[in-house]
Image (tube, rainbow, N blue to C red):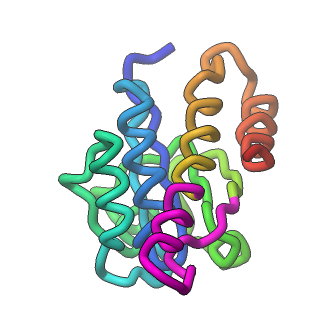
């Protein structure tokens, strides 16, 4: 196995909550084996403060969190890192036409309910963010435990996709 970390791009429409949380969680849980990024098809331009609050409470990295367009990672960008995995974390991004990614990365959809869409009081909103974070944390822990260097491409692709079916 290469010493080069695996690049993973998490996509969501707004890139303000779920994909940001996934990026932070994987950068923490991946312990240097993975370099996570996030982006959106229609980024909001800001990170949801409840996502930052929750990640901070859980000692996850937040210092570089920013909402960005997925074109930053597309093939036409010479400075774009080559992705090994591209994972959508919201339903609307899974059905969109995605840019061409350099290097033919493996793709998967790990749909997670949108905590930023929850209406109600602050506690209800925080609960939704905790639930989304819990789902992502479970999936990412499974992902980082995969014996990536021992699996052929098709087996690995199937396992990464199957993770999206876990809660």
- What percent of the width, then of the height, locates residue 87? 60, 54
Please state which of residues 54 and 162 is positioned toward the viewer in this rendering.
Answer: 54
Residue at (70%, 57%) from the top-left corner? 109
| Residue 15 sits inside the magenta stretch | no
Total residue callouts = 0
Bounds of the magenta segment: 111-131
Q: Main secondary structure of the magenta part?
A: helix
Residue 68 vs 127, above or below: the answer is: below
Instruction: Choose top left, top right, bottom left or bottom right for residue 38.
Output: bottom left
- What percent of the width, then of the height, locates residue 118? 56, 80
Residue at (76%, 44%) from the top-left corner? 166
- What percent of the width, then of the height, locates residue 162? 80, 42
| Residue 119 sits inside the magenta stretch | yes
Residue 40 vs 34, above or below: the answer is: below
Q: Does residue 75 appear in the picture of this structure? A: yes
Residue at (56%, 66%) from the top-left corner? 128
Please state which of residues 77 and 107 is positioned toward the viewer in this rendering.
Answer: 107
Please state which of residues 135 and 12 is positioned toward the viewer in this rendering.
Answer: 135
Residue at (44%, 67%) from the top-left corner? 17
Residue 11 vs 31, above or below: the answer is: below
């Amino acid at each position: 196995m290469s010493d080069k970390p695996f690049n993973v791009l998490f996509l969501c429409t707004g890139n303000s909550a779920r994909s940001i949380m996934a990026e932070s969680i994987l950068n923490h849980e991946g312990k240097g084996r993975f370099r996570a990024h996030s982006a959106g098809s229609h980024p909001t331009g800001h990170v949801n403060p409840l996502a930052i609050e929750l990640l901070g409470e859980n000692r996850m990295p937040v210092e570089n969190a920013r909402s960005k367009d997925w074109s930053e990672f597309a093939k036409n960008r010479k400075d774009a890192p080559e992705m090994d995995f591209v994972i959508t974390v919201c339903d609307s991004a899974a059905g969109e036409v995605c840019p061409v990614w350099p290097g033919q990365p493996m793709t998967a959809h790990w749909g997670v309910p949108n905590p930023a869409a929850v209406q109600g009081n602050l506690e209800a909103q925080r609960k939704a963010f905790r639930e989304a974070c819990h789902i992502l944390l479970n999936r990412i822990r499974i992902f980082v435990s995969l014996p990536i260097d021992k699996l052929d491409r098709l087996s690995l692709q199937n396992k990464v996709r199957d993770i999206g079916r876990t809660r």
